[in-house]
Image (cartoon, rainbow, N blue to C red):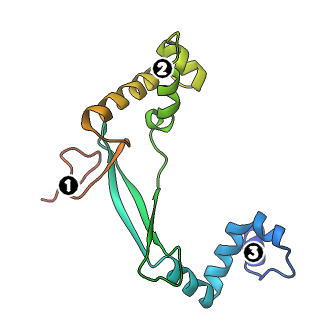
């Protein structure tokens, strides 16, 4: 019952609210406005006219993830100019989350061991070992990020259903 009352009260429009209060709760305010105001929803659609969800896969793994590509108007006077904003819709695997930090620590002199790097980053030796392999794979492939966009069915993919 308390959750129902809480949900009901969160749908009430805000009264007199200062700019600082709105800034502190911007996500809540925008969610409320987009869900309750046709004008706000239309403004957002004009600001972000296109959103595409694309499958991506790590170069060193089989799991397929989702990535959003938002096409945003930076200038409302020039409707043809759209800027692309890319946002991953998942939490990356451990060996990719701190890839840059592991590589930076590994390049220090004297060179720390993988166990020392793992301790510094609060993770295991094997996770660090995987992190240190990934930059080599990326360098060999000539890529700058650990994920690739998929345009067709990958050769290997975790939990990929095969059509019969």
Alpha carbons under labels 1 and 2: distance apart: 37 Å
Q: Secondary structure at mark 1?
A: loop
Alpha-carbon distance for marks 3 and 2? Answer: 50 Å
Q: Which residue position is annotated with label 2?
A: 107
Q: Cβ–Cβ below 8 Å for labels 3 and 1?
A: no
Q: Which mark is residue 111?
A: none
Q: Foreground residue, 4 or 57?
A: 57
Q: In the image, what residue occupies the spot 52% across and 85% down?
A: 77
Q: Secondary structure at mark 3?
A: helix
Could you tell which of marks 3 and 2 lies nearer the N-terminus?
A: 3
Of the image marks 3 and 1, the number of the one nearer the N terminus: 3
Q: Quadrant of residue 161?
A: bottom left
Residue 88, image x, y percentages: 46, 54
Q: Is the residue marked by circle 3 packed among few (<14), some (14-19), or many (20+) residues within 10 Å?
A: few
Does 160 sit above or below residue 123?
A: below
- Where the N terminus falls, by quadrant? bottom right
The single residue placed furthest to the left in the displayed view is 164
Q: x%, y% of residue 135?
A: 37, 31
Tell me residue 164's x, y (percent): 12, 59
Residue identifier under label 1: 153
Q: Are marks 1 and 2 in contact (CB under 8 Å)?
A: no
- The mark lying in front, picked from 3 and 2, is 2
Position in image of residue 66 (x %, y %): 39, 57
- Looking at the image, residue 133 sits to the left or right of residue 70; the answer is left
Which of the two residues, 130 or 102, is positioned nearer the viewer here?
102
At x 27%, y 38%, the residue is 142
Q: Which mark is residue 10?
A: 3
């Amino acid at each position: 019952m308390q959750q129902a009352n809480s949900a009901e009260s969160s749908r009430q429009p805000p009264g007199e609210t200062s700019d600082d209060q709105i800034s502190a709760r911007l996500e809540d305010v925008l969610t409320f406005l987009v869900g309750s105001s046709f004008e706000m929803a239309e403004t957002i659609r004009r600001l972000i006219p296109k959103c595409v969800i694309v499958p991506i896969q790590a170069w060193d793994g089989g799991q397929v993830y989702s990535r959003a590509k938002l096409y945003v108007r930076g200038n409302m006077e020039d409707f043809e100019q759209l800027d692309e904003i890319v946002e991953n819709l998942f939490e990356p695997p451990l060996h990719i989350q701190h890839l840059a930090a592991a590589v930076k620590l590994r390049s220090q002199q004297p060179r720390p061991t993988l166990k020392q790097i793992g301790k510094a980053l609060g993770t295991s030796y094997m996770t660090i070992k995987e992190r240190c392999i990934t930059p080599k794979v990326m360098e060999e492939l000539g890529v700058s990020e650990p994920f690739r966009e998929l345009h067709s069915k990958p050769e290997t993919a975790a939990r990929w259903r095969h059509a019969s």
